[in-house]
Amino acid sequence: MVPRSVRITGWGHYAPERVLTNADLEKLVDTSDEWIRSRTGIRERRVAAHHETTATLAAIAGKRAIAVAGLDPQEIDLILVGTLTPDYWMPSTAALVKEAIGNTRAAAFDVMAACSGFVFAYATADAYIRSGMYRHVLVIGAELLTRFLDFSDRNTCILFGDGAGAVVVSASDEEGGGLAGMEMTTDPDGAYMIWLPSGGSKSPPSAETVRRGEHFVRMEGKETYRYATKTLATSALAAISRAGWDPSEVDLFIPHQANIRIIESVAKGLDLPMDKMFVNVDRYGNTSAASVGIALAEAVDFGRVKVGDKIVFVAFGAGFTSGAAAVEWTADPAHGRRAESVQPVASVRAPVDWDSVDPMPARLTAVLEDRQGPQVPLDDVVPGEPEHAPREVPA
Ligand code: ACO
């Protein structure tokens, strides 16, 4: 049945506990807290623990969003995960999330649009529900970028962090509200401005690709910056105009959290005060596809959004891609408290007869352990034994 409207009914986020500060990065590359804060606005970012993966981060955020929506996980018809850092090339991260949240009936697939992944997945969810095919879709943006960074490259390793943000998008029998205007663009002129060269069919993994450092994110910062400032403003304007709104009517912008200077320049371009821009890049850095989802969940939980508000999500990313959504908010922000009972743990099916290597970059482990003392995965602690079997700290 075709619904009267399509609305966001649940939201949630999860950020790993461990914090990587600018001072930590000073020990790894030739940089400074002052440079990072003044050029990007980032003070710290989160780093997933050894046992965490993109799917576990996604599942926790997803479970929180489902609790806020007041649904049982089995009521979810479709699971979409926007990510550029999946657990595996196959199966999809969405397939792993499906089992981890306790759902046996949903279809599940990943959406690959880099940092625009959450906004693209949200648009996909809206279209499926609008067509009458599904009633409840779980949309997650989740990223574990610290596993794909070269911690000797100061141009990239200071920018990114880990986390997940999610919404439940639902069919409604009430008129109005929800997605009012949408814009999505893809510009292959920027295809190699942010990229991860090897591991795909063009350049499969080999000892040589590893030796050449081709499994890490590479970026032309200046070109990306130029594209971002232009496209965020034009995409937001296109979505706002499709909604029939004027930019001055928008109550809150929830932009991709890549760089505070990019966000400031978008505010200036749209002639808006900075207090209409939600900002948390200082605490999380750039979490790519997770960024808008985390920012939305925090904005609602921090009391920045109320029923009837006009809000705009806007993102850009590798591809180049950009996406913007003009949304009239309909859910009671107090429902956010329902997520408090969801513990920050998720269990994802492990492969049979296969142990992965330690997933943490050695340089990152060394700096974190140097600051916080040895961290021993729970699995390594045998009852009755001394709690800390010292681990080898890589040089
Ligand atoms: N610490 C200290 N110095 C640095 C660092 C660092 N971490 N990084 C670069 N520098 C140096 C450069 O080497 C350069 O030195 P030089 O003048 O001697 O050559 C100087 O600082 C200035 O470098 P710029 O590149 O001009 O610095 P800029 O002000 O442009 O800031 C930044 C760089 C922060 C990367 C910026 O260009 C940016 O934010 N770009 C957009 C990045 C982005 O948003 N990427 C994510 C896209 S989303 C996705 O899909 C993954």
Image (cartoon, grey):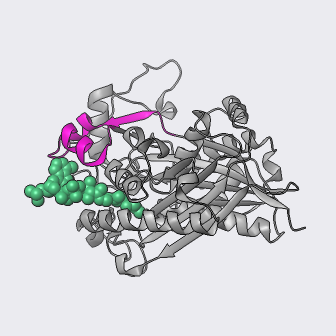
Q: Is residue 312 left or right of residue 107?
A: left
Residue at the location (26% across, 72% down)? 208
Q: Position of residue 374 (x, y in %)?
A: 34, 28
Q: Nearer the viewer, residue 322 or 318?
A: 322
Taking 298 as reference, is 158 left or right?
left
Looking at the image, is 144 positioned above or below residue 218?
A: above
Q: Indicate whether residue 29 is drawn in magenta.
A: yes
* Residue 166 in view, yes or no: yes
- Residue 268: give x, y in percent of width and height: 37, 54
Q: Give the image location of residue 292, x and y in percent.
A: 52, 52
Q: Looking at this rendering, what residue extends furthest in the left direction?
A: 30
Q: Where in the image, quadrant-wise, is ligand 1 located? A: bottom left
Q: Nearer the viewer, residue 111 or 241?
A: 241
Picture quadrant of residue 284: top left
Q: Is residue 74 above or below residue 106?
A: above
Indicate yes or no whether the magenta region holds residue 39.
yes
For the residue pair 344 and 204, the one nearer the viewer reads as 344
Image quadrant for the C terminus? Answer: top left
Q: Which residues are magenta?
A: 15-43
In the rendered image, the quadrant that contains the N terminus is bottom right
Write the residue at 64% across / 61% down: 122
- Residue 91 visible in the displayed image: no
